[in-house]
Image (cartoon, rainbow, N blue to C red):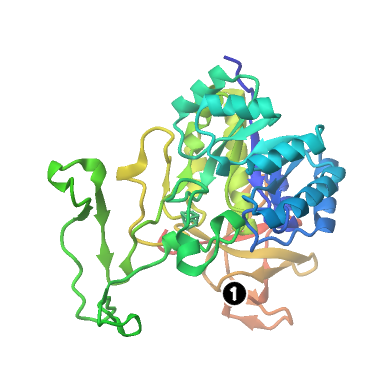
Amino acid sequence: MTLTPSPELLMPAGNFEKLRFAFAYGADAVYAGVPIFSLRARENDFTKEIIKEAIEYTHSLGKRIYLTMNIYAHNIKINKFLDAFCEMADMGPDGFIMTDPGLINKSVKLRPESIIHLSTQANATNWATIEFWRDIGVKRIILPRELSIQEMATIHEKVPDIELEAFVHGAICIAYSGRCLISNYINHRDANQGTCTNSCRWEFSLAVDKGSLLEAESVHTENADYQPLAGKYLAKEASRAEQNYVGQQFEMDEDEHGTYLMNSKDLCAVELLEDLREAGICSFKVEGRSKSVYYAAVVARAYRRAIEDLATGRPFNPENLQELVSTSNRTLMTGFMKKRPQEYGENFEDGASLPLTHRFAGQFRDYDSASGLALLDLKNRLEIGDTLEWITPDETTAVQVESLFKPNGSRVDVAHGGLQCQIPVPFEPNEFTLVRQVLKSA
Ligand code: SF4
């Protein structure tokens, strides 16, 4: 088996700024969506001009950029898609991420020199399917998150002449990737056209049927009389429940905030990079084009360090996992990589992604060397006494807030998110400096 000495770190680029930070903090490559033809249609400001600029910027750093065009197309979009593909191909990206078999087939014939990666949405779960895609002309397979590392290794053994990419970090669909109508059903936003509203993570509550949809009375209560359910509750499949077959039972929970039925924990495989490399994975992919620039930076830095440790034979450093835990998440797990996640994969507490130990405090904008004050765009509230960590691609420096100033120089005790403030800093920050707050309960 050939080992990939140092697999690529592939980060999401939801916009140009996130792309710049992802590279500054250690990404080898990024993926960015082509407007209306990728599955992040709503959080995408990549116009054709910006894509061209992004490709030039990426190549000036000696790095790689892949363009995502992974919708399943209806007839009406075919010609527009192929026109856009040719236009993008002329710009010289390092690859295209696609799903739709018909569009892949046509794209390969139109531009045989272009490199096509098969999107995870295509659900290529076995080596026979991957042989098929190789024969069509696809150069890389982005493996479904539903595969175990053992299955990945078998695929690599059977089809060694195709690149394999695997997700190592980020959100997971509760549905089989790409095969989901939940958002479409609930609020007419189609996941396979890039407009999913994460409806699987919403908070639901029970209501008593009063004979009219408009009059259903909520039994979900936030009042002081609420009595949390005691014990553990399971939903059982009706006809086979008496067999007590574990696979047919689903844990249910309701607290004073509501009920979460389908909210997956997030994937984190930072401790499994060596196993993945041995299974033939050449690209470690992080999900999250809609996440913040802070998330892109901190996650890229943690995986970069872990990949370097792997390349030089150093043991896994738990600090890298702690860094990942510090970003917003819905509780981390290793997904399907080692065992099936039926019994540990859901988060019944919160549908939102929450900061646990740190939160993004602000982004550096300017520095006045005479006063030693840095100007920040604040993302969250700050006050005197808070502990801040100043982050650069190479280090993290903790400083307690002893004074805060408005941009006009007036002193304040509290500064609010969404505004700017000035704050003393013991070193001169650079354009990639970010600031995070240590949460008091951490
Ligand atoms: S609704 Fe949930 S499971 Fe379905 S595509 Fe969206 S995130 Fe995935």
x then y, percent, for residue 60: 85, 42
Judged from the image, the secondary structure of the residue bearing numbered disc 1 is loop
**On screen, 370 above or below 270?**
below
Farthest residue to the front: give it: 75
x then y, percent, for residue 394: 67, 44
Residue 354 visible? no
Residue occupying the point 63% across, 30% down? 133
**Image-based side of 173 in relation to 41, left or right:** left
User: For residue 110, what is the image quadrant?
Assistant: top right
x then y, percent, for residue 334: 43, 40
User: For residue 100, what is the image quadrant?
Assistant: top right
According to the picture, the residue beneath numbered tag 1 turns out to be 417
Q: Nearer the viewer, residue 386 or 48?
A: 48
User: For residue 384, what is the image quadrant?
Assistant: bottom right
Residue occupying the point 45% across, 67% down? 186
Residue occupying the point 80% across, 32% down? 112
**On screen, 140 above or below 256?**
above
**Image-based side of 271 in relation to 393, left or right:** left
Q: Nearer the viewer, residue 30 or 322?
A: 30
Residue 276 visible? yes
Farthest residue to the top: give it: 1
Q: For the N terminus, give its image quadrant.
A: top right
Amino acid type of the residue that numbered disc 1 sits on in the rendered structure? Gly
Farthest residue to the left: give it: 242
Q: Nearer the viewer, residue 377 or 34?
A: 34
